[in-house]
Image: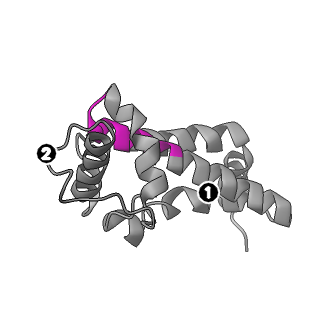
Amino acid sequence: MRVRWLDRALDRLAAIADNRAVFWATAMGFVGLLWLSPRLPMVDLPQHAAQVVMLRDLLLSASAWTDLVEINLGTPYLAGYLLALPLTLVMPVSTALSAVLSLSLAGMIAASVALREEAGADARLDWLFLPAFFGLAWKWGYYH
């Protein structure tokens, strides 16, 4: 036997889950989470920050290590470094990395929603994309 109040509650939850404005507001809330901490809790992020600063100094000929280091164009992180590089000219490197990661999270959510729409799947699946960014790769500092 079904309970009426439970049916009504489930119907209300389904209506909220189908509401696109609520979903996108929540998604932007997830992006906002990246700005709550002065340092993001990623293991390798300090190393990535150092790489961006070293790259900036090499390109501006301001590095004392020019004769000892070289730019590795084969690194998988180069695209992220190049996105953060111009930002480091006007803001601290930690803020620049947070900005790039915010764009990455927003882009991942938007791309996942577009892929789900292309596949014709149920829109309620979009809610599963929100925490997916903060997995093992996030914890260990995969700067993407």
Specify the segment rendered in magenta.
91-103
Kindly identify which numbered label has been placed on residue 27.
none
Q: Secondary structure at mark 2?
A: loop
Is 119 in front, or is 86? 86
Q: Does residue 54 show up?
A: yes
Name of the residue lying farthest toward the left: 64
Residue 81, position as x, y percentages in the image? 40, 50
Q: Does residue 7 show up?
A: no
Is 55 in front, or is 15? 55
Looking at the image, is 77 positioned above or below residue 19? Answer: below
- Residue 97 in magenta? yes
Please tell me which residue is depicted at 23% across the width and 40% down the height of the picture.
Answer: 38
Residue 120, position as x, y percentages in the image? 86, 63
Tell how many labels. Answer: 2
Of tags 2 and 1, which is closer to the observer? 2
Kindly identify which numbered label has been placed on residue 127.
1
Q: How is the image coloured?
A: one colour
Residue type at mark 1: give it. Answer: Trp
Local crowd at mark 1 within 10 Å, few (<14), some, or many (≥20)?
Answer: some
Residue 28, position as x, y percentages in the image? 53, 39
Residue 25, position as x, y percentages in the image? 58, 37
Q: Main secondary structure of the magenta part?
A: helix
Q: Could you tell which of marks 2 and 1 lies nearer the N-terminus?
A: 2
Please tell me which residue is depicted at 42% across the width and 60% down the height of the picture.
Answer: 77
- Residue 60 in magenta? no
Local crowd at mark 2 within 10 Å, few (<14), some, or many (≥20)?
Answer: few
Please tell me which residue is depicted at 67% across the width and 46% down the height of the picture.
Answer: 16
Give the residue pinned by disc 2: 64
Q: CA distance from mark 2 to mark 1?
A: 48 Å
Q: Secondary structure at mark 1?
A: helix
Residue type at mark 2: give it. Answer: Ala
Question: Which image quarter is the N terminus in?
Answer: bottom right
